Amino acid sequence: MDNKVNVFKKDLDECIRSTNFDNFSLLMLHVKLKTIKKFYKESYEKLTGDIINSLKKTKPKNIIVPTFTYSFTEKKCFDNLNSRSEVGKFSETFRLKHSVYRTNDPLFSLAHTENYDNEYKELNKLAAFTKDSVWKYLFNNNVTIVNIGLSHLIISLIHYIEFLCDVPYRKIFILQGMMIDNNEKANISYTFYARDKNSKYGLNWDKIEKDLKSNRLLKYSDNNILNFNWIKAKDLSKFIMLRIKSNPYYLVHKID
């Protein structure tokens, strides 16, 4: 087992060394560990710790991981401390073991290795993918988006770019619900930018990934197990905005 652990660390460190991360970059991770766990035969906790510790060697300002809770749309209640992440084992393990701060967002919360409450104090914490939300901060600060172990590209920030471009298949929704923070309950009104649940359009990640790679914007490793890739927010937005200007439906395709 120790040899497998060493192989994972070696493979991961090789992927990270191939990056052009600037020191003190802001990193956002989208990670799926299922295939990685099966191949390297290690626990989710160990793999998560190795990923975070290895990335910390690049001296990031912060490492941010989505800890989304889609069930808020039905349950209408979010507990910042106790609501589990609903986007995978890595996300939940990160929230419990490596995060010191989680945004008070009932639907699209983000967990951090550093406390960014002061950085976000001027933002609307009850809004997602809109002009006054945390996604504006991440966009303006040119966050580096990293994918590890995913079968296809995932970039949550793309929804903020869609908002800036005012795409025709998304709109503003408002939900009423309850927030629990430090055991104190409060009724809230939450704003987010999304597709209607009956929308016939979905993001065409295969095309987006292919186009970003062919234009040498999405950087990636040759390791098929880790499937490690990364892109800067500003590189992503410049490319996508030009294409949406020509075709408002560039990012999506029709789904059944």
Image (cartoon, rainbow, N blue to C red):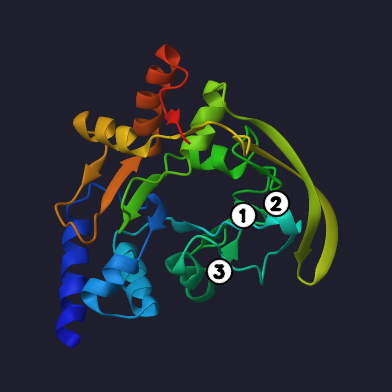
The residue sitting at 77% across, 65% down in the picture is: 180
Residue 175 against residue 102 in the figure, above or below: above
Identify which residue, 22 or 207, lies in the foreground: 207
The image's mark for residue 70 is 1
For disc 2, the marked residue is 73
Q: Give 198 or 162, whichever is nearer the viewer.
A: 198
Name the one closer to the observer, 154 or 196: 196
Amino acid bearing label 3: Val
Please state if 7 lies on the left or on the right of 56 as rendered. left
Residue 254, image quadrant: top left
Whole-percent x, y for residue 181 in the image: 75, 65
Residue at x 68% of width, y 65% of height: 80
Residue 152 x/y as whole percent: 32, 47
Q: Quadrant of the N terminus?
A: bottom left
- Residue 100 is left or right of residue 33, and the answer is right
Mark yes or no: residue 7 visible. Answer: yes
> How busy is the neighbourhood of tag 2: few (under 14 within 10 Å), some, or many (20 plus)?
few
Q: Quadrant of residue 6?
A: bottom left
